[in-house]
Image (spheres, rainbow, N blue to C red):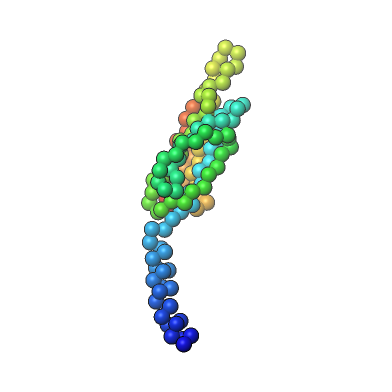
Amino acid sequence: MAKIVSKLCLPAIAATALLSGCGASHDIEYSATGGGESGTGTVTYVDSSGETVTESVTFPWRKTVSVDEGVKVTLRVMPVPLTAKFGQLDIPLKVSCQISVGGDVKDSLPLHERLAECDTVSQ
């Protein structure tokens, strides 16, 4: 009987293996830094369900989500506040962003004034 069950199960196992390659998902790691002394800001990114999410964060910040292959992912980073006071001067605060797919950096923007935006397609 065991041989009959294994013969019946093999096609099902093979079909499952083939189907798991369809609509493959990829781990996306978002990261952001910056924000001056307070080290705070907002990040807007695409989550696992494909929705755009905005969060208030403390830098450095990281988030990993899993998205389907071919999904465009974006990360937008802004410091809060946008500037810092030094005497009478308002100095723009800098932030950076980075998106990695499966451990490989796909887009990054190092320390940019007031806003950093990164994007890529998961593949």
Check the image and report above or below for 31 versus 123. Answer: above
Vertical position of residue 28 compared to residue 97: above or below: below
User: Residue 45 lies in what quarter of the image?
Assistant: top left
Any part of residue 112 in sight? no
Please provide percent x and percent y for residue 122. 42, 50
Please tell me which residue lies in front, 121 or 80. 80
Identify the residue at horizontal 57%, vertical 12% (top origin). Answer: 88
Q: Position of residue 25 (x, y in %)?
A: 44, 55
Q: In the rendering, at what x and y percent does residue 2 appear?
A: 48, 85
Query: Could you tell me which residue is drawn at 40 percent across and 54 percent down?
Result: 69
**Residue appearing at x 55%, y 35% in the figure:** 57
Tally the marks. Answer: 0
- 2 versus 48 height, above or below: below
Residue at 39%, 76% (x, y): give it: 11
Residue 84 picture quarter = top right
Taking the image as shown, residue 38 lies to the left or right of residue 68, namely: right
Residue 19: tell me if it is visible: yes
Q: Nearer the viewer, residue 54 or 84?
A: 54
Residue at the far front in the pictured view: 1
Q: Position of residue 5 (x, y in %)?
A: 45, 82
